[in-house]
Amino acid sequence: MPVFRWRESWEPFRDLERQVDRLLGSLPFPIPMIRLERQYPPVNLYELENEYLITAELPGTSSDDLELTMGSGMLTLKGKRTGPVGVADDRFRRHERVWGAWERSLNIPDRVESERVTAEFNDGILKVHLPKAAEAKPRQIQVVQGSTS
């Protein structure tokens, strides 16, 4: 009888992963961060004709709880989400939404006019407009004959 069966070799690991997920899901404290693979908040960066546009999904966040700073080629988003009011931690049977303070820093493109950056927040979507700076155009440098003294 073969010890290793190719078709069935990963099934025990899948069973183990399902059992661990079930165990972690049943714990009464907020453990979903262990398996969180994405950073918060999720963002998209678009290059448009005259600007770069960053969008971030921030459900449950107020514009008063947002802080944006830019410097050294980085845009930093800071904020907080408040948890449910009047619900004790021991009442949770499932806890997938995170709350509390968060911070995320993003590299921004070099060609951005930082003094013209604007942001708007509507229906839980943050939009950060990063206007493109004019590219430095090459210029012709005239070479003149120097004296031989």
Image (cartoon, helix red, strand yellow):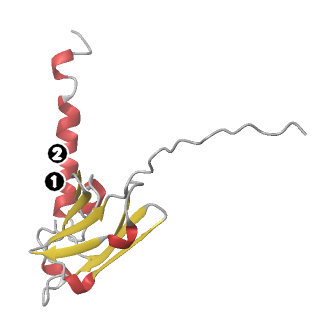
Q: Distance between the Cα atoms at labels 1 and 2?
A: 6 Å
The x and y percentages for residue 103 are 35, 70
Q: Residue at x 18, y 78 (%)?
A: 61
- Kindly identify the residue that appears in the image at 25 percent across and 64 percent down: 41
Q: Nearer the viewer, residue 79 or 9?
A: 79
114 lies above or below 134: below
The quarter of the rendered structure image containing the N terminus is top left
Residue placed most toward the observer, 104 or 89? 104
Is residue 73 visible to us here?
yes
Please tell me in which quadrant of the rendered image residue 31 appears.
bottom left
Q: Is residue 101 visible?
A: no
The kind of secondary structure element at disc 2 is helix
The residue nearer to you, when weighing 50 against 77, is 50
- Residue 118, percent across and down? 27, 73
Q: Residue at x 23, y 10 (%)?
A: 2
Position of residue 110 measured from the top left corner of the image (x, y, whole percent): 42, 54
Say what secondary structure mark 1 lies in. Answer: helix
Residue 17 in which image quadrant: top left
Which residue corresponds to mark 1? 22
Q: Counting other residues with Cα less than 10 Å from the Cα at mark 2, is it few (<14), some (14-19), or many (20 or more)?
A: few
Q: Which residue is mark 2?
A: 18
Q: On the image, which quarter does residue 5 sit in?
A: top left
Looking at the image, residue 22 sits to the left or right of residue 103; the answer is left
Q: Is residue 115 above or below residue 135?
A: below
Which residue type carries mark 1? Arg
Labels 1 and 2 touching (C-beta < 8 A): yes
Three-letter code for the amino acid on which mark 2 is drawn? Arg
